[in-house]
């Protein structure tokens, strides 16, 4: 326990001394955008204003299964409406740390959807399409995301060039300390955009030491061929960037199956072994995987595993993974090693689910020094 306390104190001190440095860093991120409705499913209603929610996905599944061949009514209650999408949540978290963020995505076109107005005050924001819609059914054991994504078909390389500007894109892309392209699964033409960027980089190579972060975002519905192509392109950016690929636990096993790897052991050791297998095949700089209660990072044949803070009753879970990713990237930008970067990631995620808002660097330091435990 003393060892863990020392690590957290060291991480807090390093982050606090980096505040001034971070304020001069830049990030360029995209390309999705969603309006999220955070929803609870009613189990029993006591009155017009009071109800008890279905606590678990299992309970919802049982209720749905019981309606097979008949019918049923499921009442849902919207708890809050907020900006959504992996990109906006990631970018909003980065801006909360003090990084100068430029965001390009699907936030409303030709004018922003009002849910993104506060985000636009914290970051330099551009939009080329309407946002998608997510109904996020939250439970104690996870969440079910019901999404409408047809508007993301507008996120194409042609529309980026005509609605945003080719020169402006490469100006932002070329100058950023961190580039983040996320939610590949829900953007049908993201692979084509990456292909265009790789062609440009091949013609005009860059040798700056910069980070490029990718998050595929639940690729289960995409074909094996699509996933393999995306992974090949992610690996292709390693020639020009320090590539970081982020996955949650479910995604890691799905990617492992697509790559023909051993995915039989669903434990910490099994996930660590899988991470090493994936990174060995992809030949990228870093792979991070974030299950619910801990996270790990693999680089150069070494895996670092870090437990997250204990949060008994999360106020929100949608966006927790994006906050982990933002925290991990912050750590890497500040020159922290993988262990401290993962610790920064789980702290950012823990603060978010506990407070339903993105943390500042002082917020991270405070949580590190007053670590929530059982």
Image (spheres, helix red, strand yellow):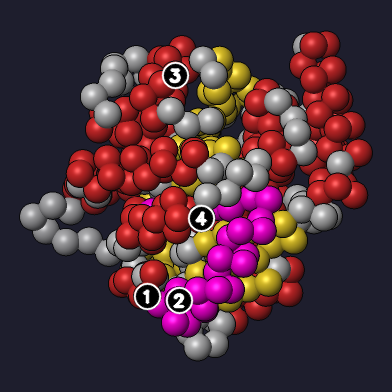
Task: Name the residue tied to disc 3.
Answer: 276
Is residue 265 depicted above or below 307 in this figure?
Answer: above
Hey, which quadrant is residue 162 in on the image?
Answer: bottom left
Is residue 37 depicted above or below 273 in this figure?
Answer: below
Q: Nearer the viewer, mark 1 or mark 3?
A: 1
First along the sequence among labels 4 and 3 = 4
What's the mark number on residue 202?
none
Instruction: Name the outermost residue toward the left.
Output: 69
First along the sequence among labels 4 and 2 = 2
Q: Nearer the viewer, residue 170 or 299?
A: 170
Please say whether residue 66 is visible from this viewpoint: yes
Question: What stretch of residues is rendered in magenta?
Answer: 159-184
What's the mark number on residue 158?
1
Evaluate if marks 1 and 4 touch, with contact meaning CB atoms under 8 Å apart: no
Characterize the local packing of mark 2: few (<14), some (14-19) or many (20 or more) Cα atoms within 10 angstroms.
some
Hey, which quadrant is residue 16 in on the image?
Answer: top right
Please say whether residue 143 is visible from this viewpoint: no
Residue 296: image location, x then y, percent: 56, 25
Task: Name the residue tied to disc 2.
Answer: 161
Characterize the local packing of mark 1: few (<14), some (14-19) or many (20 or more) Cα atoms within 10 angstroms.
few
Characterize the local packing of mark 3: few (<14), some (14-19) or many (20 or more) Cα atoms within 10 angstroms.
many
Q: CA distance from mark 1 to mark 3?
A: 37 Å
Evaluate if marks 2 and 1 touch, with contact meaning CB atoms under 8 Å apart: yes
């Amino acid at each position: 326990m003393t060892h863990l306390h020392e690590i957290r104190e060291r991480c807090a001190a390093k982050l606090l001394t980096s505040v001034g440095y971070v304020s001069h860093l830049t990030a360029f991120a995209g390309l999705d955008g969603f309006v999220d409705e955070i929803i609870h499913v009613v189990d029993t209603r006591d009155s017009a204003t009071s109800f008890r929610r279905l606590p678990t996905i299992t309970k919802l599944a049982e209720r749905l299964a019981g309606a097979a061949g008949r019918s049923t009514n499921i009442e849902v209650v919207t708890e809050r409406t907020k900006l959504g999408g992996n990109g906006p949540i990631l970018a909003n978290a980065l801006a909360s740390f003090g990084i100068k963020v430029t965001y390009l995505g699907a936030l409303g076109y030709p004018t922003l959807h009002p849910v993104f107005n506060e985000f636009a005050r914290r970051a330099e924001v551009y939009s080329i399409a309407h946002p998608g819609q997510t109904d996020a059914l939250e439970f104690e054991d996870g969440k079910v995301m019901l999404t409408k994504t047809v508007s993301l078909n507008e996120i194409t390389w042609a529309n980026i060039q005509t609605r945003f500007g080719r020169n402006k894109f490469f100006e932002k892309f070329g100058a950023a300390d961190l580039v983040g392209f996320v939610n590949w699964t829900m953007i049908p033409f993201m692979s084509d955009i990456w292909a265009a960027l790789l062609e440009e980089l091949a013609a005009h190579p860059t040798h700056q030491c910069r980070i490029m972060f990718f998050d595929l975002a639940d690729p289960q519905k995409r074909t094996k061929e699509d996933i393999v192509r995306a992974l090949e392109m992610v690996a292709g950016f390693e020639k020009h960037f320090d590539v970081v690929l982020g996955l949650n636990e479910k995604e890691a096993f799905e990617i492992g199956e697509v790559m023909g790897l051993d995915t039989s052991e669903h434990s910490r050791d099994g996930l660590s072994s899988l991470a090493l297998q994936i990174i060995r095949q992809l030949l990228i700089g870093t792979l991070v995987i974030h299950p619910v209660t801990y996270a790990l990072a693999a680089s150069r044949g070494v895996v670092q595993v870090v437990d997250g803070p204990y949060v008994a009753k999360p106020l929100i879970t949608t966006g927790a993974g994006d906050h982990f990713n933002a925290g991990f990237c912050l750590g890497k930008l500040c020159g922290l090693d993988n262990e401290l970067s993962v610790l920064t990631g789980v702290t950012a995620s823990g603060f978010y689910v506990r407070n339903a808002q993105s943390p500042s660097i002082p917020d991270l330091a405070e949580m590190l020094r007053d670590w929530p435990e059982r």
